[in-house]
Amino acid sequence: MGWMTETSLRVILIALAVCCGSASCKGYKFADRGNGSFTVSVGGVKIIDHTNDKPFLYLGRGSTKFLEYRGNFNIKDYTLERIGLKLIKRTSTANGDQLIMVYNYNAENITVNLGSKEGHPLTVDISDLGDQYDRLWVRIAAQPSDAIYGGGEQYSYLNLRGRQYPIWTREQGVGRNKSTLVTFQADVMERSGGDYHTTYFPQPTFYSSQKYYFHHGGSNYAILDFGHQDFHEVFIMGKPGRLYVNTGKTFNDLVTKLTGFLGRMPPLPDWIYDGAIIGIQGGTKKMLEYIDYCDQYDIKLSGVWIQDWAGTIQTGFGKRIFWNWRWNATTYPDLNSTIPTLKERGIRVLGYINPNLNKEGDLFAIGDQKGYFFKNATGQTYLQDFGEFECGTVDLTNPDAYQWYKNEVVKKYSIDLGLGGWMADFGEYLPVDVHAFSGEAATIVHNKYPVLWAKLNREAVEESGNLGEVVFWMRAGYSGTGNYTTLMWAGDQNVDFSYGDGLASTIPASFNMGLSGAGITHFDIGGYTTFAPLMVRTEELLLRSAEAAVFGPVFRSHEGNQPAANKQFYSSPGISMKFSRLTEMFTLLKNYSQHVVNITTETGIPAQRPLFMQYENDVGSQDVAYEYMYGDDVLVAPVISAGKSSWNVHLPKDPDATSKWVHLWSKEEYDGAQDITVEAPIGQPPVFYKSTSKFSKTFEAIGNMPLVVVPTTQPPQTEPNTTPSSTMSVLTSVTLLTISASFLAILSSLV
Ligand SMILES: *[C@@H]1O[C@H](CO)[C@@H](O)[C@H](O)[C@H]1NC(C)=O
Ligand SMILES: *[C@@H]1O[C@H](CO)[C@@H](O)[C@H](O)[C@H]1NC(C)=O
Ligand SMILES: *[C@@H]1O[C@H](CO)[C@@H](O)[C@H](O)[C@H]1NC(C)=O
Ligand SMILES: *[C@@H]1O[C@H](CO)[C@@H](O)[C@H](O)[C@H]1NC(C)=O
Ligand SMILES: *[C@@H]1O[C@H](CO)[C@@H](O)[C@H](O)[C@H]1NC(C)=O
Ligand SMILES: *[C@@H]1O[C@H](CO)[C@@H](O)[C@H](O)[C@H]1NC(C)=O
Ligand SMILES: *[C@@H]1O[C@H](CO)[C@@H](O)[C@H](O)[C@H]1NC(C)=O
Ligand SMILES: *[C@@H]1O[C@H](CO)[C@@H](O)[C@H](O)[C@H]1NC(C)=O
Ligand SMILES: *[C@@H]1O[C@H](CO)[C@@H](O)[C@H](O)[C@H]1NC(C)=O
């Protein structure tokens, strides 16, 4: 860059700084139409369209009941009164506009401050609602053609338009589709069937295809309503936080701006790309037997994940994990000396924790004595039932409790033991009748609790110098989760191919969660929720799920909540050989995966992203919910139905006319802008890479790997006694009683 250009650029930058620093520099355009009618636009997009007959703000009062049963919330909202607010006065200053909006004839009013704060061209601050009112509705101008994305981890639909999305972290539900039998049964037996919008990770942030995002800064219960032609409506219970609007040239630009504001995830440890993390359990001896078994089949391992490391207890539902988050030497003798030995072999041992402690454990006793748990109405520790055992939940709004859990529990017992990571489970169960140390209403703490939980885990890892070495993964989340967590996972899918709650649902979930700021995620290979004998994991599901996981950042298996009923990677030599090949594929992708995750950490653009983010001008890409780009160079169209041997794929038009789509397995080259059908036997998922990719050699190496031919004479088995370590309840016979017992077990989360 020449001297002249550099100087003139500097002059321009100084001019901008002066403009935005002090004098007039509103990032939005306010157009007064007279008679109290106005519009507010940002970057040419109309965001607010107000007339006193069709106002952009409504105030109201009513009652909201949160009926909770083991993390499933049935929310009953009743509005008694709803009043449109009229503009009576506007004061315009250099930095914003103050609007006085009235709601009755006694001069009572709401003050709305429009401004450009915290890097956003439009921010909206709304005053207290007054004594009589407890809810607010904000309308954002819409076009009938708007497509809407985000809203946190939304599983059932990629485009949220046409539906309502309550913003309340909770169990995702079993089935999540009211027209399926599984959902019906879960509802009848445990009130836990869920619906299209129930999620562990909701977020009051949405993107419009008009290229803006809207974000609500509070943690109030809210509803995003996209069911109207000419407006989107955001319901907020209680005093709202700041509202933010930002525009961008592209979706990538928008997600970079949002994550620049809310925070971005750090890189994953390098070791995680070196093989599978296998979810197994049953004690040290068994763990070592599984590792030997993997050696025998050349299954590449980066870790063993033992969720029962803290021991087990017996309940009416069968064995459950003892929620007392420290090494249990009875269940896992010599674990402390085994961990470093395995680490030398490149195998990490990973554990499990959550923010609840069983009242029978020694850690509970300490926390209880210090008053570190949420309290009930009589000021005593609030005990919550998690399925025949009761727990206290650490009150993370209490700074002392927070430090205690971080230092004396997580650092001391998980990190110092040498764990390579853990599932940081739960965070979404906080009942609305708890009393928090901070004095905030439980309804305000509820949604932000998962973020506090993520922050605690992150600080434990970072302060002990282990960021980039130790990884924790979470399911619960809210705005800001991406700033703290090291990894997400998609929660508890059913062991089936359903759109509402099966393998398929993890794809839109990763998109919407990525757009909400958490772009590094993965899922339980083979799913989790099992309901024998009606719903069990098949070999096909296990392998289809694993082959999809190859093209993502983390490859982790889970036995499910009824291990014996499910097919496992160790269920037969044939499955093990196929699984082994998939772990080899995953490790061959290491360089590329690191590259992809790096981009996410630097830009916020999710590792797995919808086609339309990369190909905004490709018409056929707009509604594709079940294909994704893994980074810039690889297109993946996982087979998400049973019984298929071929699969239809949309190939977008790449702006680089010289780039072709190379089919990973046949090496055939295709032009973009077409729909094709390819052969897709198990083990060869439909995957395409750009012919111009600098990682072509890596992809070729994978594409050269032949399918496994399982010998008809089986090799001798020296596999571990694979009677599943029955941490989970296992059903053998089906009577009404056992069905309902198993449902209780399923729905009470089961660790
Ligand atoms: C304002 O309202 C008055 C009375 O309703 C109407 O006569 C007038 O045309 C309106 N002006 C504008 C600019 O809409
Ligand atoms: C707004 O309400 C306050 C308090 O109720 C009152 O003092 C003030 O005059 C009102 N402002 C307008 C412009 O009506
Ligand atoms: C993200 O985390 C860092 C480190 O804890 C913190 O300083 C920063 O304020 C957080 N950002 C947001 C938006 O919360
Ligand atoms: C370890 O687990 C066993 C049961 O598996 C339990 O009886 C024991 O109390 C646990 N020990 C500790 C220290 O938590
Ligand atoms: C493992 O823990 C036991 C106590 O349970 C202790 O005696 C032993 O020294 C520890 N070993 C190592 C290698 O830390
Ligand atoms: C509060 O919790 C204690 C146990 O910690 C229980 O004994 C008491 O009944 C509870 N009080 C209320 C009002 O729920
Ligand atoms: C819900 O289930 C019905 C019936 O099986 C199915 O047609 C539909 O696609 C499902 N929808 C979602 C979003 O899961
Ligand atoms: C990964 O990158 C390293 C360093 O650039 C290179 O040596 C290695 O061959 C690459 N591995 C694969 C599988 O491409
Ligand atoms: C990831 O980013 C870091 C820092 O920007 C860089 O040092 C590293 O080489 C990158 N790795 C890959 C695989 O791109």
Image (cartoon, rainbow, N blue to C red):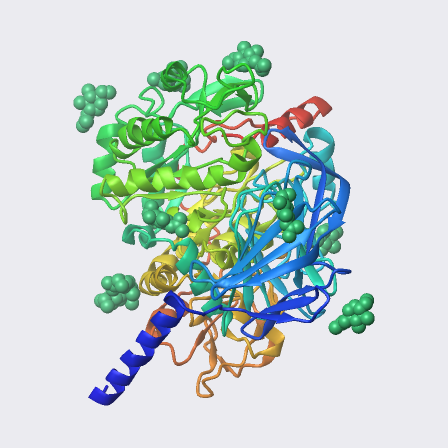
Q: 632 left or right of 462? A: right
Q: Along the line of sight, which residue is nearer the eye, 649 or 621?
A: 621
Q: Along the line of sight, which residue is nearer the eye, 362 or 20?
A: 20
Q: Does 555 appear above or below 290?
A: below
Tell me the quarter of the picture where residue 150 sits: bottom right
Q: How many marks?
A: 0
Q: Along the line of sight, which residue is nearer the eye, 747 or 72?
A: 72
Q: Quadrant of the N terminus?
A: bottom left
Whether residue 222 is visible, yes or no, is no
- Quarter of the displayed picture in which ligand 1 can be seen: bottom right
Tell me the quarter of the picture where residue 493 sits: top right
Q: Along the line of sight, which residue is nearer the eye, 354 or 162?
A: 162
Residue 501 location in percent, x, y? 62, 47
Whether residue 461 is visible, yes or no, is yes
Residue 284 location in percent, x, y? 32, 29
Q: Does 350 appear above or below 624?
A: above
Residue 167 location in percent, x, y? 60, 45
Q: 536 left or right of 338? A: right
Residue 229 location in percent, x, y? 74, 64
Q: Does 559 appear above or below 98?
A: above
